[in-house]
Amino acid sequence: MDAIATALADVWGFLSDNLIPRAAGTNGPFWYFAVKSGLNLATDYLWFLAGGLVIFGLFVRKRGERFSLWAGIKYLLPLEVYRTPSVKVDLMMVPLQGVLSFVLFTGLAVSSGVGQIWLVQWFGHVPWTVSIGWLAATLQIVFTLLGTDMARFAWHYQAHKVPFFWEFHKGHHSAEALHPVFVRTHPVDMTIRLVYMNIGGGIVGGALMYIAGVDASATAAAGLLVIGVIYHFLQEFEHSHVVLSFGKTLDKVFYSPHFHRIHHSALIQHRDKNLGFTGGLCLWDRLAGTLYVPKPDEHLVYGASPEELGENNPHRTLWRFLSRPFVAAVKTLRRRTPPGSAASHAAAAS
């Protein structure tokens, strides 16, 4: 346990020096947390605008047309999107999302390293060890990302296929307008996701490190934090109308942001498709039969289902978004078969 504590202390020292604001300690006033959440949101929007303007100038603007900053901003931030009740619920969830995101980033940095240290303490070192520093750090990063990617896909598949968990995840899909930076996520759904990614991903990544003879290092943890920031930037585009692709070749291997827009469509042909993670592998979707490569002009209607749009949306307010999943999830436990399954249709017909 001493080795785990030492490794965590090294990573926490890096976090406190580089990521945590000095005034955000336990003695800071509560209003600082609210202000800081707003500043973080503004910073994310600035990064989205910077990247989006490049995309607008290179790929959206008509050839020969003069670049206009105002035209680019109007394209990236359409007013009709921000006037919807859906976006208002999303914005109310920003402070809580900030806390959960920090836990996610921290878990990404330390999970596999802690898993590897735990295995060494219980079973001893394998006979071989990767002694080249840069190679060991690189392998730790690769194994951590692979373990996290697998674990996140497993969580997402469960969230869509198991009715109990779907009721908590459904709120994320009930958003009828996508916009950058953040789309609502229920705290229960996010907590389950964090358990899968930080613990499940840590077990897979740590086991791979242990088998390969890779020791955990704070250097790799710092590198993972940097990669996490890059992932965060790319994910700002997956919940927006801006199409960001890695290109035809890379899109066959890695899950690009514009794949996720399909995932949020309420149309039947898009349901339960593209369960992957931006920057992750398309392999898991291919194996599960859930990969859907979107057409350039693909028609989309955002929402949980065609029957739950507008006034029929069960999550039109923050209170309903937070409370209704508990009631709906309990009701699923009383059903003998999942709604919409072949067995339930057969039972209804009889």
Image (cartoon, rainbow, N blue to C red):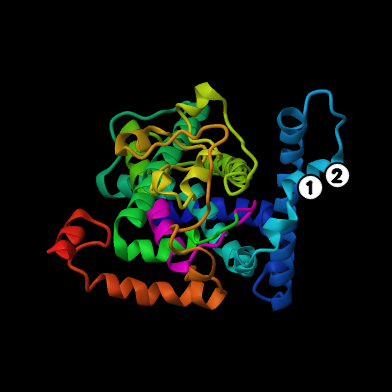
Query: Residue at point 53% right, 53% down?
Result: 302
Q: Is residue 117 visible?
A: no
Quick one: quadrant of the C terminus? bottom left
Q: Which residue is mark 2?
A: 70
Residue 2 x, y percent position in the rendering:
41, 56
Quick one: quadrant of the N terminus? bottom left
Query: Residue at point 42% right, 61% down?
Result: 169
Is disc 2 in contact with disc 1, using a CB cutoff of under 8 Å?
yes
Judging depth in this view, the residue of 113 and 242 nearest the camera is: 242
225 relative position to 308: left or right: right
Q: Give the crowd class for mark 1: few <14, some 14-19, many >=20 residues within 10 Å.
A: few
334 relative position to 106: left or right: left
Query: Of all residues shown, which one is farthest toward the front?
Result: 349
**Badge 1 amino acid:** Lys
Q: Which residue is mark 1?
A: 74
In the rendered structure, does residue 183 fall within the stretch colored magenta? yes
Q: Secondary structure at mark 1?
A: helix
**Badge 2 amino acid:** Trp
**Marker disc for residue 22:** none
Q: Give the crowd class for mark 2: few <14, some 14-19, many >=20 residues within 10 Å.
A: few
Where 137 falls versus 167 (above or below)?
A: above
In the rendered structure, does residue 192 fall within the stretch colored magenta? yes
Q: Secondary structure at mark 2?
A: helix
Judging depth in this view, the residue of 109 and 190 nearest the camera is: 190
Q: Is residue 204 visible?
A: yes
> How many numbered marks, from 0 up?
2
| Bounds of the magenta segment | 178-199
Residue 75 x, y percent position in the rendering:
75, 44
Query: Which corner quadrant of the image does residue 189 belong to?
Result: bottom left
